[in-house]
Amino acid sequence: LYYKLLEENRMLYNQVQDLKGNIRVYCRVRPFLSNQSDTKSTVDHIGENGNIMIINPHKQGKDARKIFSFNKVFGANTTQGEVFADTQPLIRSVMDGYNVCIFAYGQTGSGKTHTMSGPDIKTEETWGVNYRALNDLFNISKSRTSVLTYDISVQMIEIYNEQVRDLLVADGSNRRYPFQVQLCLVSVNCTEDVLELMKVGQGNRAVGATALNERSSRSHSVLTIHVQGKELVSGSIVRGCLHLVDLAGSERVDKSEATGERLKEAQHINRSLSALGDVIFALAQKSSHIPYRNSKLTQVLQDALGGQAKTLMFVHINPEINSFGETISTLKFAERVSSIELGAARANKETGEVRDLKDEISKLKSALESKE
Ligand code: ADP
Ligand code: MG
């Protein structure tokens, strides 16, 4: 009975995830920082159903307001725990063999690293999506030991100027992925193992302590968690992976100012972010040709974008008036990748199927708990 309920629970759970569509976009608004004195915001209003109204500081009246719609909008007061609560179901589907990509998009300083990693490893309440995800995956793995055994391993890379660097080996520069050298894949047993590895990765990332921040905003970093589960009775294998991607800053660089290295970086970033947008857009449109080969980032993530795979994009915006231009271009990018699937997700919400399935799951959950 236990096994049957567990199986049923998992199936329903994944059905709910399927109903919600394969591409989701959540918008998160960064709060004003404590050292900011002018706290006039471009965010006029956040609605309940994933709508956000932005106000143009240079215009008056009706023309000044524009509404964007996403699957969810998190206001400036949203906690890390609340953000994770809406991400967790997707992450859990990895344990059942789904591939999932979670992206953090936005201009430098908008809160991408805050969402993915958090400000401080030492305080658990402020942990970002990645540590919470790992904890969750290890907990699920433990709770299923009577029916499945899992192997969990991680990989960390950085993509800078279209070069892939393996962050888990000391001299990982210029490794050719995925055609020649296998990336370093490290088996882990608990979140602490991963924290240790992430320290190694960060260390390998640093070209010099002061350059780190600069550089991290101009490279994409990808933490990948591979999960392989073996069912004890049938011996069948389920494989899933989770990519957690902290993207390079999306800000446009003033062409008249940027020269040399800086211009080259900016061009690589613009190109790879557009390539990512194009891939997600093509997937949302169910296009027959998906242009994966236009950037290293989309090549590396190819197996986890499209098909049965699920994508969640967190788009981050700064509230300040002087970020208005970047905020609009960020929201336009996000709207482009979300608009089509959003329609489907909304329709499903109306039929109440998702709600019914959720009720079903909670019943199964209490049935399971009373058996334990
Ligand atoms: P990015 O990675 O997009 O460049 P960061 O995540 O480094 O931006 O955020 C920039 C600053 O804003 C950091 O000091 C960070 O701690 C702070 N910050 C970002 N988002 C939040 C938030 N939701 N709550 C509190 N502080 C935040
Ligand atoms: Mg960052």
Image: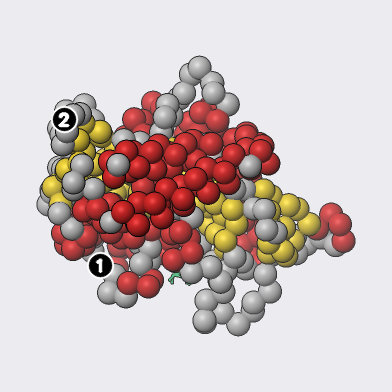
Q: In which quarter of the image is residue 32?
A: bottom right
Identify the residue shown where x is 44% and y is 39%: 12
Q: Taking the image as drawn, is residue 28 in sight? A: yes
- For the residue labelled by badge 2, is the local secondary structure a helix, a strand or a loop? loop
Q: Is residue 277 shown to the viewer in this render?
A: no
Picture residue at 50% right of the left edge, 17% below the top: 288
User: Dot 1: what SS?
Assistant: helix
Give the mark nearest the N terminus, 1 or 2.
Answer: 1
Q: Nearer the viewer, mark 1 or mark 2?
A: 2
Image quarter (top left, top right, bottom left or bottom right) of the C terminus: bottom left
For image coordinates 35% across by 51% down, the residue present is 368
Image spot of residue 22 (x, y percent): 49, 36
Rendered position, 83 above or below 11: below
As drawn, 36 above or below 59: below
Q: In this view, does 193 lie to the left or right of 81?
A: left
Q: What residue type is labelled 1?
A: Ala
User: Which residue lies most toward the right here?
Assistant: 61
Q: Quick one: 165 or 308, which is closer to the camera?
A: 308
Q: In this view, does 306 lie above or below 69?
A: above
For disc 1, does the CB lie below 8 Å from ligand 2? no
Q: How is the image coloured?
A: secondary structure
Three-letter code, disc 2: Gly
Q: Residues within 10 Å of mark 2 (few under 14, many from 20)?
A: few
Residue 34: image location, x then y, percent? 52, 81
Left or right: residue 297 compared with residue 357: left
Q: Name the residue under label 2.
A: 235
Residue 154 point in image, percent of width and height:
21, 47
Residue denoted by label 1: 209
